[in-house]
Image (tube, grey):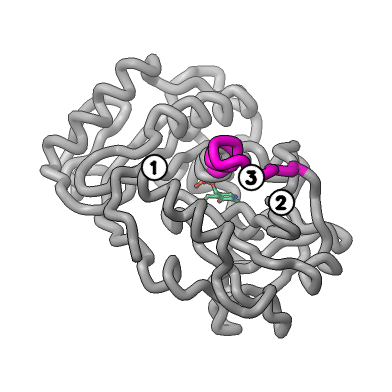
Amino acid sequence: LYVLTEKQFLPRHEVTYPMEERGLQFGDGVYEVARIYQGTYFLLEEHIDRLYRSAAAIRLSIPFEKDVLMEKLELLREINNVKKDAILYLQVTRGSFPRNHAFPTENRPNLYAYIREMPRKTEEIERGVRTILTKDVRWEYCYIKSLNLLPNVLAKQEAVERQAFEAIFHRDGIITEGSSSNIFLVKDGNVYTHPATERILNGIVRMKVKQFCSELGIPFVEEAFSINDIAEADEMFLTSTTSSIIPIIQVEEQAVGNGKPGEVTRKLQAAYEKAAGLAVQS
Ligand code: PLP
């Protein structure tokens, strides 16, 4: 397995970092996860554009120009002979320097990117998933895809311990997003989701769903909804790069709608599969 670093392609075991790496010590960096279906990147450019936006927000420079980075990522896929469904993980940190909170005076960011096989979550996509609610205790800059994921880790662990697929964050009863996904509610044919403010990560799949809605004539309403609205929902679903579009059939003890994946969700799933060049499910 080969890994792309800021310097060169290296075999996986040769990629090691000093103790004083700012990603390790401070979470001082940003990352992306992009999808690969049957050996082909899906929406890679959108992810790379967001990577540069996240980096700019924390005043971090990416060690490659966008075009060069895109070419190297294609090469990474080729030299690893990726043919299946997989994900690309890429992170950039402010580098390795003697520990000090303030920025190092030298600009020497660390970058690494690797590809890991990851099948589609076909069972969840088909049947839908159970979720829990948890308090959103994160900072105010959730639009940055930063390496600081402790609140997300704790939320997801709570979900796993309670036999749920995802933890849904709320701020004073207002649903923001999931621990690693965006959250949507369907009511009377309209799709509602939290607006893309600094309080959420504007998901690449979220943006795609917005486009599908416009193409399908489904009103896409970027208005936050609350925990109280869930009892009245017809459908709910979540989106993320690793999950694509997954129906939410339960939130805590509350069944969503009739407790089964809904019609609007199914239409959006079909649009996604078409866009990604996947075989349309029955
Ligand atoms: N929100 C959070 C907090 C995430 O970590 C993620 C991705 O994992 C998402 C939303 C969904 O973003 P994307 O569709 O770009 O994967």
Query: Mark 3 = which residue?
Result: 218
Per the image, the residue denoted by label 1 is 34
Kindly state the secondary structure of the residue where label 1 is placed: strand
Query: Magenta residues, as a range?
Result: 209-222
For discs 3 and 1, the disc positioned in front in the rendered view: 3
Residue contact between numbered discs 2 and 1, judged by CB atoms under 8 Å: no
Q: Which residue is mark 2?
A: 190
Ligand 1 within 8 angstroms of badge 2 C-beta: no
Whether residue 111 is in magenta: the answer is no
> Could you say where residue 6 lies in the image, as x and y percent from the top left?
32, 27
Mark positioned earlier in the residue sequence (2 or 3): 2
Is residue 217 left or right of 175 when viewed as pictured? Answer: left
**In the image, residue 217 lies in the stretch drawn in magenta:** yes
Q: Amino acid at mark 3?
A: Ile
Amino acid type, label 1: Ala
Q: Quadrant of residue 58?
A: top right
Element marked by disc 3? loop
Where residue 90 appears, as percent x and y from the top left, is 38, 39
Q: CA distance from mark 2 to mark 3?
A: 6 Å
Task: Identify the residue at image location x=58%, y=57%.
Answer: 264
Q: Is residue 26 above or below residue 9?
A: below
Q: Nearer the viewer, residue 106 or 5?
A: 5
